[in-house]
Amino acid sequence: MKRLLATAVLAVVLAAGTAQAQTSVKIGVLSDMSSLYSDIAGPGSVAAAKMAIADFTAKNPGIKVELISGDHQNKADIGSQLANQWYDVDKVDLIIDTPNSGVALAVSQITSTKNKLFIVSGAAASDLTGPKCNANTIHWTYDTWMLANGTGKALVKTGGDTWFFLTADYAFGHALERDTAAAVEKNGGKVLGKVRHPLNTNDFSSFLLQAQTSKAKVIGLANAGGDTINAIKAGAEFGIVKGGQKFAGLLVFASDVNALGLQTAQGLTLTETWYWDANETNRAWTKRWQAERGAAGKFPTMVQAGVYSGITHYLKAVTALKSGADGKAVVAKMKDTPTDDPLFGKGTVRADGRKIHDAYLFEVKAPSESKYPGDFYKLRATIPAAEAFRPLKEGGCSLVGS
Amino acid sequence: MFEIFGIPSQALFGQLLIGLINGSFYALLSLGLAVIFGMLNIINFTHGAQYMMGAFTAYLLLQHTGLGYWPALIVAPILVGITGMIVERTMLKWLYKLDHLYGLLLTFGLALIIEGVVRNYYGSAGLPYTMPESLQGGRNLGFMFLPNYRAWVIVASLTICLGTWFVIERTRLGANLRAATENPTLVRAFGINVPRMITLTYGFGIALAAFAGVMAAPIYNVSPQMGAELIIVVFAVVVIGGMGSILGAIVTGFGLGVIEGLTKVFFPEASNTVIFVIMAIVLLVRPAGLFGRRA
């Protein structure tokens, strides 16, 4: 049925194409399809991209959109090679998604030299709109500064003023630790110590013992995915939370909460920019997404919602320009036009390429408070768009005139 | 209170104990590998995937049949062990006469397939598994807080390891098994069904991996890649101990757990490399491993 519908849409689009000269663009979802981040982004991002294209072309039959997708396997060299091939051979105009900051930084560079367009939804490093910014890249959904500022500030303000960091020992972890430590200190807190652990550490008990002896009130987890899950699981076992210390998951997705189980994850504070159960529109979108993805029990993440939102805004700009060929021109148009879509509401794209919208501070519910599958969070605070992201002048982006 | 290298002795004792606990997992997994290599001459790269299957089977048993942790500790290894025996009967048995490399490639490929299939159905983020109530909580030892579950891990692992060592090195069954590896034709002449014995041994090695998987489920993330992350370290343990040496696998498993634990205190960044550094040194000084027989 779905395929039939897609064919029908395509037929209509093609028929319209014969009537008038048509704008056509090609979008590539470059993601982690088979590993660590494939639940956060991956096939779910492709589903979101399909939905965005279907919704937009239904209202604007004058544009023809093709979609392809690929797996970067979390390796910067494979990601770069795919990006080059897509731009040069397959004539892709826009690459979107790309979790893993290492890959995203490489693709951003390539996009700039080839004057194409790159919308980052999955990667976190705030450097993408800081020292490493360029006129062809837009960072859509979230970044390390925003996570640090949201969770860090909120915890210091509620009394968590001494911190100990467990940091994944690579670019992303360092960036997250640096940004969070800055937010903590700026709000009057103190960093008592830190441990840099290797990526994919199985057992955190040794590090937790060190965190325990530090007597810090908050243990900041500057890591992601399996590392975060293993740390919190071991923390529950070693009585960290019962002993009065608190975990701050600096990058936690709904899928991680699901993996931990509410019993273990309850009380965890985290920041996200989109939550599937926040309102009626999101819930309706989630239903469609689950059907498109073919996964009834899964819930979309903010990264996947960001792919939908990003493509929608991109297609608006392309329609207005009647061409997607000049990456810089499309980005400029996207920065000029305020954003407005069902999932992220109204927002803007800043001069440095940072997309601006509200962020939300959530707390994970206790098992007794959760009424249905996927009922993970309660809203603690809304961080207004103007405060949620790094101030334009502080990023060190060369596109920002002083 | 005295200090050792600037670390309070209390904290150090805690870290030593934690190292022993992690060593229990290394020992359990490398024991299975050593049994399979020693008896079948197969380098079983599927071991990590089978460890993961153990954890997932425990999860599925709980979800679909309501079987909790304790029954799963017995049922999951049996089920996974049976799948192992099927693999041995249908695929591995054709490779015994060939170079080690073929077995390695086959089992490595199988590991990738199993991981891919599990990821396809359950995603990569992982699944929750709650600790049995009887093992929750812990006790204060004075120098550290010891969760009951970790104490149980040490006890269970030591029992299984020593039991296996005893059966293989000190009983008639073990003697037959070792003889069958040395000279299968001769052992067959005594009326012993060698192929069946080999199949059961492989099944037992796999069951050990699955057992470790169930033990890991309540404390580590139950995800498709949980085995792949661990298996490389475990292989290093087996190489250091001496390929195929049962006692070597057990002693090095615990020993390296402790060394890794101490590294996590003094130089955390190197905690995942220290084992490979030791492996390199051991290979230079004693190429057959610490307990290897062909030194």
Image (cartoon, coloured by chain):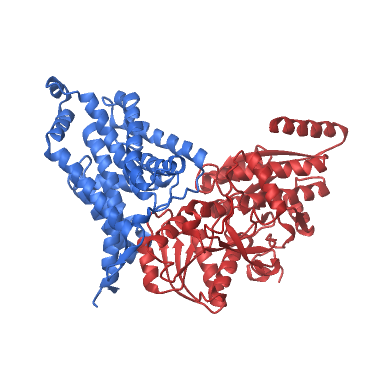
Quarter of the figure with residue B96: top left
Q: Is residue A86 left or right of residue B102?
A: right
Q: Colour of chain B?
A: blue
- Chain letter, red in picture: A
Q: Is residue B13 left or right of residue A179?
A: left
The quarter in which the N terminus of chain A is drawn is top right
Nearest the eye: B6 or B80: B80
- Residue A270 in the image: state x and y as whole percent: 56, 63
Residue situated furthest bottom in the rendering: A188
- Residue B154 in the image: state x and y as whole percent: 26, 54
Q: Residue at x 20, y 42 (%)?
A: B164
Nearest the eye: B263 or B29: B29
Up-down relation of residue A172 to residue A94 (above or below): below
Up-down relation of residue A145 to residue A290 (above or below): below
Nearest the eye: A303 or B162: B162
Q: Residue at x 27, y 46 (%)?
A: B28
Quarter of the figure with residue A15: top right
- Residue A267 in the image: state x and y as whole percent: 52, 64
Residue A207 visible in this rendered orientation of the protein? yes
Q: Residue at x 48, y 48 (%)?
A: B126
Residue B295 visible in this rendered orientation of the protein? no
Q: Is residue A365 left or right of residue B167?
A: right
